[in-house]
Amino acid sequence: MASLLGVEATGQSAVAATTAARLAAAGADVSIIATDCGVQGKPVSKYVDVPSSVHVHIFPSIGKLNRRLFRSPALTKWLREHIHEFDVLDVQGVWSFVGKDASAVFAAARKPYVLTPHGMMTRYDWQKSTLYRRLFFAFGFGKVWREADAVRFSSTGERDTSYYPPAGRSAIIPNSIDIQSSPTPETRREARARLGIDEQTPMLLFIGRLAHQKGIKEMLATFEIIAPQLPNLSLYLVGPSDGDYGTEALAVAAASAYRSRIVITGPVFGDRKYDYLRAADAFITLSHNEGQSVAHLEALAEGLPMILTKSSNMDFLTEYGAGILVTHQPEEAAKAIVRLLSDPEALAQAGRGARRLVEEKYVPQVVIPQLLTLYKEVFSARTSRVV
C-alpha cells in the first residue's frame, strides 16, 4: 500500500516499487495499491517504473480535501471487495488516510497488516504539523498503530527515536539496493566526461530534497569553512528544492563567497543520477532525521565514502569503516571532513568499506528473505488467532 507512487515522492515511492519487484522476483504474488496523488496532493507527472511481475492498482482521489489528506474512497471500496485476494498488507508511510483506511479493511477481515513508517514516526517528524499529527493519531491512526501485527523499521535509529513505540511486534529490516559491477577509475572518468566535470576536481556530493530534514543550510555553512582549506573542492547539490526552506537554502548558496564551486542541479533521475554518484569522491548528508535514505544506499553501492550524522540512521557505517559520523555543528563537521578528504588512503579504505557494507547487509538476497519471513510469521500468528 503506497499513498504516493510518483517520481516526485523520491524515496518512498522508489522503495515501494523496488521492494515489490524484489518480492515478486523471490516468488511472491505482489500488488501495489496506490492513489493518483503526488506530493501534497498535486497531480503526478510520472509514475515510478514498476515491472510487469507486480500488479499495480491506482485509484483516484477526488476533491481538494481528499487529495490533501491522501484519501480515496474508491480505493477503500475496491479493497473491501477484493480482500479475499490478499494475505498481508504492508502500509508504506503513515500520515495518509488511505493507509489508515486500508489497515482498517484488513483488520475488519481479520487479516494481518504491517506498518513501514519510513521515518515518519520519529520525534523529529512529529515536530512538523504537530496539531495535525496529534489529531490524526487521536482520531483513527492511533488505533491502527497499536493494533498493527508488526511495525517494520528500517534502522535501529528509526526504532529508537519513534515518538510512540510499537504496542506489539517490531522488526528492523532495512531497505535493499541492487549493486552493479564494482566502481573503477574508468567508470568515474566516463561519468565525469558525460557530466562535463574535470577529472581533477574533487567532488563532494549530496542527493536528495533541499529540505530542513537533510541539513542543507548546515552543509553550506560547513562548506564555507572547508572551501578555503581544500581550494579545488566543489559541492554538488542534486535534488528538488523543498518549499520555503529550499528557497532560502538556494539564496544562501547564491550569496556564498564560494558560489562558483557550489553546483545546484535540480532534480535528476535515472542514468544521469548514477553518473553523479560515479563521478563523486565522497557523499555528504547532515540529516536531522531519516528512516533509511535510498540515496545513502545508492552511494554506498557505488563505493562512495560517507559523511553522515548519527541522525542519518545508517546502521553499521563505522563498524565497516565506510565513512565518518559528524555533528550538525559546521566547525566540528568541517574539521572531520577536511581530515578525511585530505587523506587519499583513508578515502580509498572508506570506499572499500562502503561497498562491503552494501554487499553484506543491503542486497536483496539478504533483505528480502527477512521481509518474507516477517510476512509469513504475522500471517501465521493472525491465522492461529482466528482459528
Image: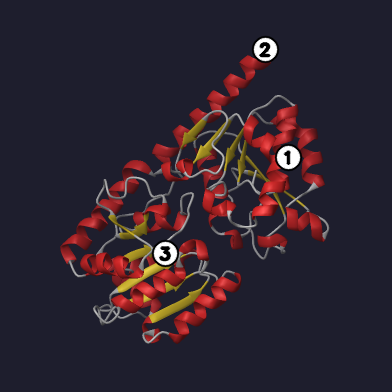
Left or right side of 252 for 301 = left
Residue 93 at what x, y percent from top left? 60, 47
User: How much space separates mark 3 and mark 1, taking CA atoms?
Assistant: 41 Å
Which residue corresponds to mark 1? 140
Residue 72 at what x, y percent from top left? 78, 48
- Location of residue 125 with respect to 146 vertically, above or below: below
Look at label 2 and name its amino acid: Val
Whether residue 100 is visible: no
Disc 3 to disc 1: CB gap under 8 Å: no
Return the residue found at the far top.
387
Which residue corresponds to mark 2? 387
Look at label 1 and name its amino acid: Gly
Left or right side of 356 for 386 = right
Residue 284 at what x, y percent from top left? 37, 64
| Numbered disc 1: secondary structure | helix
- Location of residue 191 with respect to 34 vertically, above or below: below
**From the image, which quarter does the N terminus lie in?**
top right
> Between tags 1 and 2, which lies in front?
1
Of the two numbered discs 3 and 1 on the same chain, state the one appearing first in sequence. 1
Disc 2 to disc 3: CB gap under 8 Å: no
**From the image, which quarter does the C terminus lie in?**
top right
Disc 2 crowd rating (10 Å Cα; few below 14, some 14-19, many 20+) is few
User: How much space separates mark 1 and mark 2, taking CA atoms?
Assistant: 27 Å
| Residue found 63% across the figure and 46% down from its top | 94
Whether residue 366 is visible: yes
Which residue corresponds to mark 3? 274
| Residue found 71% across the figure and 41% down from its top | 138
Q: Nearer the viewer, residue 342 or 121?
A: 121
> Between tags 3 and 1, which lies in front?
1
| Residue found 33% across the figure and 69% down from its top | 280
| Numbered disc 2: secondary structure | loop
User: How much space separates mark 2 and mark 3, taking CA atoms?
Assistant: 50 Å
